[in-house]
Image (cartoon, rainbow, N blue to C red):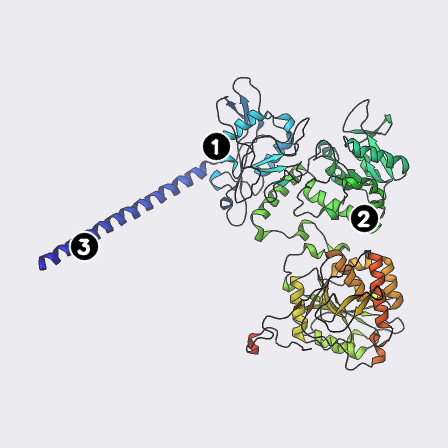
Amino acid sequence: MLNKFALIRNECQQNIYVVLLLSTLVLTGITLYNAFYKAHRLHGEDNFNRISLDLNEIAEVRLTESIDRSRPRRDNCTIWTCMDPYRCGHDHITVYVYPLQEYIDANSGVEAAPLTQEFYQILETIVKSPYYTTNPNEACLFVPSIDLINQNNINLDLVNRALASLNYWDDGRNHLLFNMLPGVYPTFNTALDVNTDHAMIAGGGFDSWSYRHGFDISIPVWSPLLRKHPVTTVYSGGSADYLLLVAQLNILPKMMWILQGLAEENSKDILLLQQCNSKPSRKTRCLAGDSGHEISYPSVLLKGTFCLLGPSLRLGNPDLLEMLAFNCIPVIAVDSYILPFEDVIDWSLASVRIREADIHLVLDTLKSISAEKTEEMKQQGRRLYENYFNSIRTLTLTTLEYIQCRMFPHMERNKKHWNFVDSSNGVALNPLFLSRVVSRSDGFTAVILTYDRVESLFLLIEKLSVVPSLHAILVVWNNQQKAPPLLSSFPAISRPIKVIQTSNNRLSNRFYPYKDIETEAILTIDDDINMLTEDEVEFGYEVWREFPDRIVGFPSRLHVWENMTSHWRYESEWTNQISMVLTGAAFHHKYWSHMYTYRMPEVIKDIVDGRMNCEDIAMNFLVANVTNKPPIKVTPRKKFKCPECANNEMLSADLNHMRERSRCIDEFTHIYGRMPLRTVEFRADPVLFKDNFPEKLKRFSDMGTL
């Protein structure tokens, strides 16, 4: 028995020795492999040099008939199915550019794709950019040095062979191809006819059928004519000679016939230009029916306030950039066209889009745009051109930045930065461009509308001063017969106070976009609403941060349709539904103050200021009409009365007050042509508001009741 146990022990010891020996050998092998691989990688990186851009050093690659060809374009590509996103690291993309080479057919000597100046500038920009890497092992994207900018200049079969011969092609994964003019006569396809397999296309002619959303990049078609017109010399801030200028060549006949009819009937509003028959050129245009008098192009675009971009044989045209360069607002009448970088650029701020079927209404549409809006669109188009499109270099860097934002969405610039909407020059940031949750540190500005209730005003200021997110207080003094109190008499608080005495006693003054308002968030509040607690106001701001495009506030109301009278009724009774939040105590984005003052129909402001009523209803109509969303009520509090104010001082004490507000809803609905208000059964309360938790665990514990 002892011998048996000894034998088993010896076998176990031998097995342990074998396992230890094998483990040692494996670990040694891994260590040696890592050391060799690291040395190889480091040695290889030392040999990866920046590619030469010397045109005299271009190598020649001869392609035989028997070599492989790239496969057709995949129609359903995403960054997860047609590329390896894990090559791109964690915070930035790297781009490898293949060395300059001439791909030539071995038998005929035909070149696959002659190098153009535009494509050379693209390669040069990438190589000199911070995105460039000399090491293909570290590359997120590969850019072949095969010029595919204009399909008219390439040999499809040779290009297919050239792509397949690339060292890192791998069925096109992680490859980026640049193309501005896809398709050839007579089909003029909107996607490059080359077999691009899994490659990503930065193209200038995509339509809604050929564009692979989230994968391809829509870029503008560059115009060589812009080289001779520096961006700083073509800006025109004055009024143009014509409302609409049509100078695009090859507009499809059906639309051109309609435009010719409009031009004949409205010769003072439309300037219609066509190609000169005697000497066809992109540098000149002639008046319709007069081919003898040549007009220089594109400088003639300065004569138009708006310029038409219509459907033609090619979907992408250089006309778009020419219009932006010469400060003519594009009127885009191409239904299926994917505009450049339209995922991040809001083209409605710089252009007008109209359906092809509605082209006969184009003048009515343009005449309805105010002079202020027109000037804003001109300025926005100017900013877009200068920052994204004014050169091949700028366009290339924009494309790379766009790809980086797509690959790393957590680092993406939000839309307000892409669109350069700046409130410093009088244009407020559109809340639709704000990040999903606004930064808490920005805070809000309390705008207090007051007339003569100084004691109540001071009490309100003291209560607001302890709210953590308060940035500043702006007192709108609506009394022209009496000067506001001196600032020295105001409560001493740690936040800045500014007092503005208005020239007229109007309720609309509370919504004027005062330059003193530095924050995106505004708390409009009446001077007698001093019952709100610090936690209630702070929580209201927290809710607004998540819904910056809505009106977020405390007192709520409802609109109700009465079948008996066929009119709308203003309902102030407590119900389970709301459709309005009164701006006597509500947060809104300062963009809506800008819209209220400059975009809302003037007749509504006349009604509000004439009756000294309904300004809160008007603001709710305005926001709902733009967003199609309801407001958000916060906290259960419904009682908003000034305990220290007599009833005869309050507007709501007037028996006609409710009737007037019902009449306002009727009239506003008629003016807008629809009922924009949305009814909702929703209220925002703190998460732990009703939970049986110790008060010290609740962030918002001092919340009012009904």
Q: Is residue 664 above or below residue 81?
A: below
- Which residue is more in the foreground, 422 or 640? 640
Badge 3 vs badge 2, beta-carbon distance below 8 Å = no
Q: Which mark is residue 12?
A: 3
| Amino acid at circle 2 | Glu
Kindly identify which residue carries mark 2: 375
Q: Quadrant of the N terminus?
A: bottom left
Where does the image place residue 538, in percent across and percent down from the top left? 66, 70
Nearest to viewer (mark 3 / mark 2) = 3
Look at 81% across and 37% down and name the residue there.
301
- Which residue is more in the foreground, 251 or 443? 251
Report crowding for label 2: few under 14, some 14 to 19, many 20 or more residues within 10 A (C-alpha). some
* Sequence-first disc among 1 and 2: 1
Q: Which mark is residue 392?
A: none
As measured in the structure, the alpha-carbon distance from the residue carrying label 1 to the one carrying label 2 is: 52 Å
Kindly identify which residue carries mark 1: 167
| Amino acid at circle 3 | Cys
Look at 75% across and 46% down and name the residue there.
350
Does the rendering let one see residue 613? no
Look at 68% across and 43% down and name the residue there.
388
